[in-house]
Amino acid sequence: MKKSIFFVVLFSFLTVGCDMRGRDGATGATGATGNSGGTGASGSTGADGASGTSGAQGVSGTDGANGATGKTGTTGATGTTGAAGATGAAGAEGATGAKGQPGNR
């Protein structure tokens, strides 16, 4: 828009200048009309992302088995009474000493 205004003003100035000198210049050819710029195409909208699949449900744990009860221990036998010790034997009597011989004097 500014360019077209500039050219109109310039053309008018030159035309007035030529009229003031008494010389008419030859009329120039009309400029070609400018084309409007094409409108840019609108961008396409992106597709929605697929939803993720749901996770599998967890399995419940099994119950633990109860432990077996231990057996009761048997009672120990009563100990027997010890045998009495044997009586010691009586000592032997000592031998009688030999008689001496009569001396020679």
Image (cartoon, helix red, strand yellow):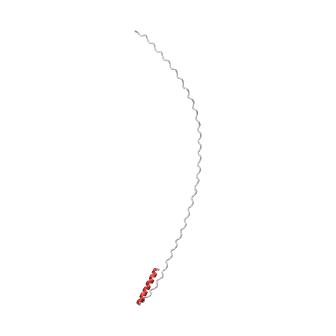
Q: Position of residue 68 (x, y in %)?
A: 59, 44
Q: Residue furthest top?
A: 105
Which quarter of the image is occupied by the C terminus? top left
Residue 40 vertical placement versus 69 (above, below): below
Q: Could you tell me how many numbered marks the image carries?
A: 0
Name of the residue lying farthest toward the left = 105
Up/down of 14 relative to 60, above or below:
below
Q: x, y (%) of residue 21?
A: 40, 89
Query: Which of the 4 image quarters holds residue 57?
Result: bottom right
Q: Quadrant of residue 99?
A: top left
From the viewer's perspective, tell me whether residue 81 is left or right of residue 22. Answer: right
Point out residue 76 in the picture as x, y percentages from the top left corner. 58, 35
Q: Is residue 63 left or right of residue 6?
A: right
Q: In the image, is 51 to the left or to the right of 17?
A: right
- In depth, the one of 6 and 27 nearer the eye is 6
For the point 44% across and 83% down, which residue is it? 9
Q: Position of residue 95 (x, y in %)?
A: 48, 16
**Residue located 46% across and 82% down the image:** 5
From this view, report whether residue 56 is shown above or below residue 100: below
